[in-house]
Amino acid sequence: MKAREELLSSIAKVELELKCTPGPWFLGGCSPSMVDLLYISTFERLEASALYWKGLHFSSGGEYPYL
């Protein structure tokens, strides 16, 4: 369970950072930056694996609306 807690803690930190930006992107602005593009592709793989292996679903609103 420690790995699950660490994963959810890390996701909560990302959620907090995104909440502090003026838009949906890490660096603000009207279009995604390289940071956003790298994050999106990594996060999509992470979410697919977590959903398949552990039943975790953390996008589409819910507990993490900014992801």
Image (cartoon, grey):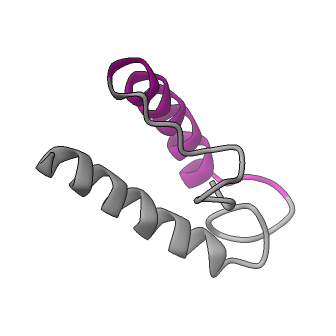
Which residue is painted at 24% across and 46% down in the image? 4
Please name whichever residue, 11 or 62, is drawn nearer the observer in this view of the structure: 62
Residue 15 lies, with reference to residue 4, above or below; the image says below
Is 63 positioned to the left or the right of 50 in the image? right
Please name whichever residue, 33 or 64, is drawn nearer the observer in this view of the structure: 64
Residue 26 lies, with reference to residue 56, above or below; the image says below
Which residue is painted at 32% across and 63% down in the image? 9
Residue 11 lies, with reference to residue 56, above or below; the image says below
Predominant SS of the magenta segment:
helix
On the image, the x and y values in percent for residue 63 come to: 59, 59
Check if residue 35 falls in the magenta segment. yes
Please name whichever residue, 22 or 47, is drawn nearer the observer in this view of the structure: 47
On the image, the x and y values in percent for residue 56 come to: 44, 36
Which residue is painted at 47% across and 64% down in the image? 14
Residue 23 lies, with reference to residue 65, above or below; the image says below
On the image, the x and y values in percent for residue 30 come to: 87, 62
Please name whichever residue, 37 or 5, is drawn nearer the observer in this view of the structure: 5
Is 57 positioned to the left or the right of 50 in the image? right
Is 47 positioned to the left or the right of 36 in the image? left
> In the picture, which quadrant includes the C terminus?
bottom right
Magenta-drawn segment: 31-53
> In the picture, which quadrant includes the N terminus?
top left
| View extreme (right): residue | 30
Which residue is painted at 54% across and 31% down in the image? 44
| View extreme (left): residue | 2
Is 52 positioned to the left or the right of 67 in the image? left
Q: Quadrant of residue 40?
A: top right
